[in-house]
Image: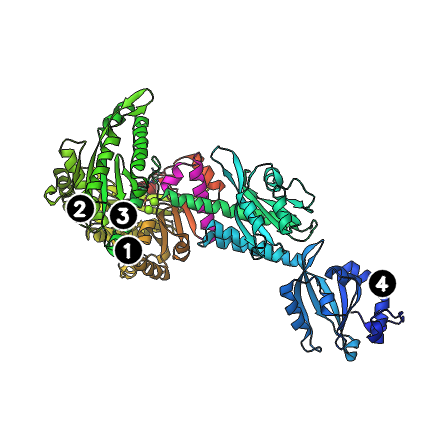
Amino acid sequence: MYDCSTLSIVPPCLPGETTLKPALKLLLSRLSQPDDAEQAASFGRWWFDMQSKQWIVSMGAAELLDVDMGLHHSLASTFAQVIHDDVALLTSALATDPTLPIKCEFRIINETAGLRWLRLISVPQQLLKQGVLAGVLVDITATKHAALRERFSFESTQFLVGSYSLGEAITKVIRLVCETLGWEWGAYWSLEQEQMGANKLICRYYWDSTNDKLAPFTQNSLTTHIPTGAGLVGSVWSTARPNWVEDMVNDHSFLRRKSALACGLKSGYAFPVSYVTADGRRHSPGVMEFFSCLSRQKEAQLPNLSATIGTLVAQTVQRLEQQAHIRQLAQIDDLTSLTNRNHFHQLLDAACLNASVSNTNFGVLFVDLDRFKPINDAFGHEAGNVVLREFAQRLRKITADNGEVGRLGGDEFAILMTKKVSIAQLKVLAERVLQAANQPFSFGDRELSVSASVGISVFPEHGWTSAELMRTADAAMYRSKKNGRNALSFFSDDNGENQEKQSSLVKQLTMETELHRALVNNEFFLEYQPVFDSAGTRMVAIEALIRWRRANGDIVLPDIFIPIAEQSRLIMQIGRWVVKQACKDLALLQQAGFDDLQVNINMAVPEFVSPSLPEELMVIIEACGLASHHLCLELTEGLVMKQPEKVIPVMRTLRQYGFKISLDDFGMGHSSLSRLKTLPISSLKIDRSFTKGLPEDRGDCAIVRTILDLGRHMHFTVVAEGVETDAQLVFLRQFGCTLIQGFVISRPKPLQELLAYLPLKT
Ligand code: C2E
Ligand code: MG
Ligand code: MG
């Protein structure tokens, strides 16, 4: 430790030194020579005379503080470069009891090195008796930068799982960089395609720490579209390299030079927001830039730090875009880009709620194309698709901003007129829909013609709920069909149940009776589909899938009868039968040597909202001698999101009992990511419709990878369902999917066949 009392040379008196204690004068004289220790360990020394409030700083300390070496008559002159906010910190640290150690961290803006973090520490020494404090100053910028990198990683994960929008997430990053690295203004430029098809960089988000002092520069940035390759931002994007502007006054290639000069900006730094994906592709969504009113010169640590930030932001941008894409996929019909059935029902629900609160009315049109099937049969699906797409466009044009058009499926469309309209206006609209259908459609050099049947219902006369309104509009549409097609009808009570509707109701009731009989006659059976690890070496679980063998030998699949069973108490009985049978079969498999095997059981809505479910399941597994962690309940995402207040408490109890829970068909529902975070689940199953497009469909690839990332971040196991090909398998393995289910490994099989197929354990 440095001891000031060892100094012996008497220095000449300099102005202001007269009040200095002799020991300090001695010190001052030695300072003009460089100190090897200071240079080797990059620190500096200081002394503070508490009586005269004068400071002495060594050569090392002066360099760090960016002031002159030697004597300073005040704190203000010694710490002239300290950031205003930190001066108070420093003053209060020095005002404490001088016999106690002082430790204080503060920031300075160094004209050449930019923002630095310094630590001031006092050291015990003999001069303290004479009222002189002494100590060292250390540059801790590198440590702070390392902590900053950590913080960026953490925050970017927060952005991913939190409910931030892209704008909020990026603005937070810009602000964090400005505040930590001492820039006054920062922005994110995003690469976008303009109407003419050219790529331009557009300033999307910015942060200004100066209370709008830089407003002209902000304005200039927000209105400038920069071609790739041009100026600072464009060249950083093109070269994928960071760049400094050391002297804006003389840099004529800087496109916003005029407004920058007017605002007093002098230097800047820009770096690419980009990263290279695991498969070697560079993803470069934009550029970040930061400016200062100081003439800052190149800082050695910045490129490293900016590479970390650039990568994290690029990954966040890509993930948030993928999430938006997933959300959009859940709401948009692929073929026509109209609102899909599910989302249309949600909009209708919301419209019912609004209208009942505001005491208004609105109309719904149900539109079905006539003679569409013959077009498909005669000219192929592509011809059918052309008609559907073009008709969708026409409906959109007619509706304009007054309502929402949805495709319900096949050749069925619906229009929700959200603006208050009269019956006469609804009739005019329906007539325009008929005309739109009557206009010919071109397919190559052919002209195709169809017509439409339209049914109209009105809130609240024909229904208070979306289900009622759709049913009455549908019934009215059937009347138009019965009246010879190419017609419109309003719903009226004398519509009655038209024949088709009646027959479908009769079919449903008949099936319900048959299902009751099937339970009594033991006509249900289970098939099991294995879930393997992605290497294909270990069977981890089996999924129980119910089938119904009718008396005549026909096999009926669950998609046909489960929805009907769900409409009555029948589903509870069928569900319990499945659990009991699956547990019995699992016990057999475990006896055969598969002692760690798990069975996955699908659960329907009514089964799952029953609070007694956990107890009932415990009774069943105990009777079969199984442990609760061998049972995994599969719930569809939609089920959880529909009634979270009822479902989540049951889920929690099940998890406490040790059962596993998997979110089935993930990606198709409407889970908000923030809710997903709180769900007590152990795994996710990627919906079959996403696996299908692998590895050719870029959208599906992006979605699957996002779900895999999500699983990793939230510590869920991810199972890919419906894997049919080796190429899909390769893709899933490459991106770290651990569990696989699908025809590529095995189709669902009855227990006996499964036992024969499996290599028995010894
Ligand atoms: P899920 O739970 O998503 O089950 C997976 C479905 O995908 C099964 O159809 C299975 O046969 C099929 N599958 C598996 N691998 C592939 C593949 O590689 N390619 C293709 N194209 N399909 C594959 P399944 O057996 O027809 O079951 C349909 C749905 O019925 C199930 O979807 C599930 O939601 C429901 N379900 C089945 N059993 C039960 C049950 O016991 N209770 C309830 N509530 N629902 C059940
Ligand atoms: Mg399932
Ligand atoms: Mg599924």
Residue for badge 1:
608
Categorize mark 2 by other alpha carbons within 10 Å: few (<14), some (14-19), many (20+): many
- Looking at the image, residue 685 sits to the left or right of residue 310; the answer is left
Q: Total label count?
A: 4
> Residue 339, how many percent across, how many down?
32, 41
Badge 2 marks a residue whose secondary structure is helix
Q: Nearer the viewer, mark 4 or mark 2?
A: 4
**Is residue 130 among the parts visible in the rendering?**
yes
Residue for badge 3:
348
The residues colored magenta run: 687-715
Instruction: Decide which of tag 3 and tag 1 comes sooner along the chain.
Output: 3
Q: Amino acid at mark 4?
A: Ser
- Looking at the image, residue 511 sits to the left or right of residue 757; the answer is left
> Residue 39, how many percent across, how many down?
79, 59
Q: Nearer the viewer, residue 70 or 256?
A: 256
Q: Nearer the viewer, residue 448 or 617?
A: 448
The mark found on residue 114 in the picture is none
Mark 2–mark 3 distance (CA, rounded to whole Å): 33 Å
Residue for badge 2:
515
Residue for badge 4:
32
Q: What is the quadrant of residue 93 in the picture?
A: bottom right
Q: Nearer the viewer, residue 648 or 190?
A: 190
Instruction: Decide which of tag 3 and tag 4 comes sooner along the chain.
Output: 4
Badge 4 marks a residue whose secondary structure is loop
- Looking at the image, residue 12 sits to the left or right of residue 471; the answer is right
Residue 699 magenta-highlighted: yes
